[in-house]
Image (cartoon, rainbow, N blue to C red):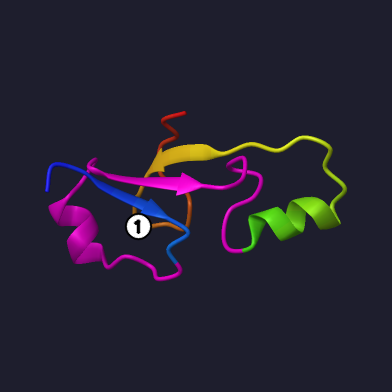
Amino acid sequence: PDIIISSQFSVIIKKQIIETFRDRIINIHFAPLPEYRGVSPITHSILNGDLEFAVTMHLIDEGIDTGPIID
């Protein structure tokens, strides 16, 4: 594929796949990054009393929600 889009995916993508599709795997993360990396970001935001929220699109790298932010 030309591009892979991940959204709410609960499995860590293997290094081999990331290397094969470098800079072509985009994650839609339902929280502002880097503040809310990882799982359940909406829950953490509510518990922290945040009044504003965001969605982040970023490239997937080998870390957890650590790839370069697109928007």
The three-letter code of the residue at mark 1 reads Glu
Residue found at x 52% / y 38%: 56
Query: How many circles with numbers are drawn on the protein?
Result: 1
Q: Does the segment drawn in magenta span residue 26?
A: yes
- Residue farthest to the bottom? 11
Q: Residues within 10 Å of mark 1 (few under 14, many from 20)?
A: some
Q: Which residue is more in the foreground, 64 or 32?
A: 32
Residue found at x 36% / y 53%: 6
Q: Position of residue 52 (x, y in %)?
A: 77, 35
Q: Main secondary structure of the magenta part?
A: loop
**Residue 17 is drawn in which quadrant?**
bottom left
List the residue tagged with mark 1. 62
Q: Which residue is more in the foreground, 69 or 42?
A: 42
**Residue 20 is drawn in which quadrant?**
bottom left
52 left or right of 32 in image: right
Q: Position of residue 4 (x, y in %)?
A: 25, 49
Q: Which residues are magenta?
A: 10-39
Residue found at x 17% / y 50%: 21
* Secondary structure type for disc 1: loop
Residue found at x 35% / y 57%: 62
19 left or right of 36 in image: left
Q: Position of residue 41 (x, y in %)?
A: 65, 55
Q: Position of residue 48 (x, y in %)?
A: 84, 52
